[in-house]
Image: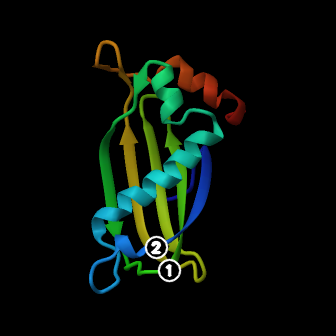
Amino acid sequence: MNNKGALLSHSVEIEIPFHDCDPMNVVWHGNYPRYLEVARCELLRIFDYDYLQMKDSGFAWPIVDMQIKYVASAVFTQKIKVAAYLKEYENRLRIDYVITDAISNKRITKASTTQVAVEISSKEMQFVSPPILYEKLAPFLK
């Protein structure tokens, strides 16, 4: 899970809210996927294929695999940077992530998600990404 070979990347900064923390002001581990989602949506918006556009094109893109490695803890009011890297798109969307402290750049978490296209009308998984994804990505892959 690294940024080498990334086709596109984007990062967002998030300040850890109180409601994401346990009584010790440490982020509960189940909140990290939400931070990944924020960065993933911003990455998808770069090529105009966020979840609304996916639905409009007739496809859902559920996450079928997620890997997370917790390296350190994020805490209440800490500013974190969540970087998302598009690594694969031909048969699936694979996005790698690195979460770091926004000030020190110290690594907190690394992760990866895999999404596959599912045709909404038939509910059939697609074994090759639909042409719309290639069209949306074409200007960025030249």
Question: Of helix, strand and loop, which one carries label 2?
Answer: loop
Q: Residue furthest bottom?
A: 24
With respect to residue 75, does 63 lie above or below? Answer: above
Is residue 103 at all visible to an observer of this figure? Answer: yes
Q: Is residue 65 left or right of residue 99?
A: left
Q: Quadrant of residue 141?
A: top right
Q: Residue furthest front?
A: 19
Is residue 1 at all visible to an observer of this figure? Answer: no
Real-space CA distance between mark 2 and mark 1, rounded to the nearest whole angstrom:
5 Å
Q: Point out the tag, 2 or 1, that comes first from the N-terminus.
A: 2
Q: Residues within 10 Å of mark 1 (few under 14, many from 20)?
A: some
Which residue is at a point 30% across and 45% down the rendered structure image?
65
Q: Is residue 92 left or right of residue 142?
A: left
Give me the disc on residue 16: 2
Q: Quadrant of residue 116?
A: top left
Mark 1 sits on what residue? 78
Question: Of helix, strand and loop, which one carries label 1?
Answer: loop
Which residue is at a point 42% across and 64% down the rendered structure image?
110
In the image, residue 90 lies at what x, y percent? 48, 29
Which residue is at a point 42% across and 81% down the rendered structure image?
76
In the image, residue 51 lies at what x, y percent? 48, 35
